[in-house]
Amino acid sequence: MTSVPVPSDLMRAADGSYLPRGKVKPADLLEDQTVDKIIGFGKELEAQIGRFKGHTFEDISEFLGLINEQYGVTKRGLKGRGNVQLTSFDGSKRVLVQVSDQIAFGPQLQAAKAIIDDLLIRWSEGARDELRSIVSKAFQVDQAGRLNHADIFALLRYGIDDPEWKQAMEAIRESIRVIGSKTYIRLQERDILDDGFGPWRTISIDLASAEVPSHLAADHRLPADRLGGR
């Protein structure tokens, strides 16, 4: 992102006008300096987290490659995804790499909803109040127009012996689209106690949205064969 250069004796206002620096209120100057300072540190931290994320994938990928080599596993390319957990020898620290699929629903979902709506009308009033509530919740969208995936998947767990219900569930299954995936790193540690361990604590670093530098991006997604099939 580029900015239009501004002469040192002027300040650009949000409306696009320019004011002599000496005419800007001291409080506004201080606010501007505070924001610039915080954003500057934030951008430095963002870059540092991106480098850390890239190097972490690099280190894990290298370690798994050595393990595979030790057991004679031949690299099979960059296909597949998986999860992995590395734990320190004393059991007090661990690194988790988790791959989460990004799900969308195709047009079959609307057909499933139409079938279920007809079923709810046909079934007697009050006979399946709990299910009515679950169905209603499953097909509600949030303010961004997104469906709640967990609520829709919950419908698939109901073993209702009705041909139309089964048809609707098949339509839901056929509507599911995996449109991508996101890889998360979680760092955790716990205290070693006299009688065992304390609870796991997550080291709070938001890595999910960090940008990995291009020269490290190759290891951003770890293939299943290098994750030991886990």
Image (cartoon, rainbow, N blue to C red):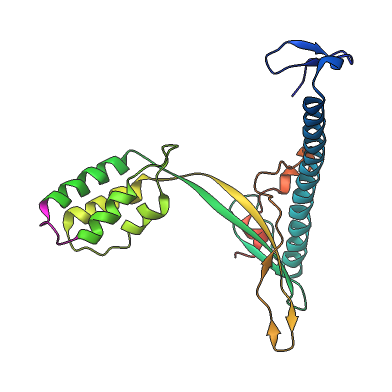
Q: Locate the N terminus by quadrant.
A: top right
Residue 30: in magenta span: no
Q: Is residue 86 above or below residue 129?
A: below
Residue 159 on image: x %, y %: 26, 65
Q: Position of residue 176 (x, y in %)?
A: 39, 47
Asked if residue 125 is among those painted magenta in the image, a careful observer would answer yes
Which residue shows up at 41% across the image and 55% down it?
150
Q: Quadrant of residue 158?
A: bottom left
Residue that sits furthest to the right in the current view: 8
For residue 159, above or below residue 27: below
Residue numbers of the magenta segment: 122-128
Tell me the residue at 67%/66% (across/down): 85
| Front residue (pair 177, 139) | 139
Picture residue at 17% right of the left edge, 56% below the top? 163
Does residue 5 appear in the picture of this structure? no
User: Residue 33 appears at what percent x and percent y?
Assistant: 82, 30
State which quadrant residue 198 falls in: bottom right
| Residue 218 location (% of width, % of height) | 72, 44
